[in-house]
Image (tube, rainbow, N blue to C red):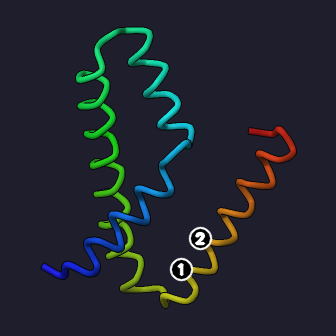
Amino acid sequence: MDLKLFLTTFLTLFIAEIGDKTQLACICLAAKTHKPWTVWLGASAALILVSLIGVLLAQVITEYVPENIVKKVAATMFVGIGLLMFADKI
């Protein structure tokens, strides 16, 4: 296993997830249900599945599309979502 890649991935996702909608939803669910371990298990399983889908999809996409194009499309989508959020459309 590539430890440097593992740590980079872990830290990137950890920092990106702090204070986002998912974490706030988990806080609300755990506070409402008083079952933090159940909420944690559900949230962890969801993040694992979403990450798996992303990694497998990337593996297929990068066989046909150059990496620089994938990065540009992802960046454009990220900015687009941000603009929609800024305009209160989502």
Distance from the alpha carbon under mark 2 to that under mark 1: 6 Å
| x and y percentages locating residue 61 in the rendered image | 41, 76
33 or 55, which lies in front?
33
9 or 58: nearer the viewer: 9
Nearer to us in this view, 39 or 52: 39
Can you say whether 14 is above or below 79 in the image? Answer: above
Q: Position of residue 22 (x, y in %)?
A: 49, 37
Residue tagged by mark 2?
Answer: 74
Q: Is residue 70 above or below residue 57?
A: below
* Circle 1 residue: 70
> Looking at the image, which residue is at 34% across and 46% down?
47
Residue 83 tag number: none
> Local crowd at mark 1 within 10 Å, few (<14), some, or many (≥20)?
some
Give amino acid for label 1: Val
The type of residue carrying mark 2 is Ala
Whether residue 37 is situated above or below residue 69 in the rendered picture: above
| Image side of residue 53 versus residue 86, left or right | left
Question: Which picture quadrant has residue 63?
Answer: bottom left
Residue 28 drawn at (x, y percent):
49, 19
Residue at (87% x, 45% y) in the render: 87
Tell me the quarter of the picture where residue 13 sits: bottom left
> Circle 2 — which element?
helix
Q: Secondary structure at mark 1?
A: helix
Give the residue drawn at x 48%, y 86%: 65
| CB under 8 Å between discs 2 and 1 | yes
Residue 37 sits in quarter: top left
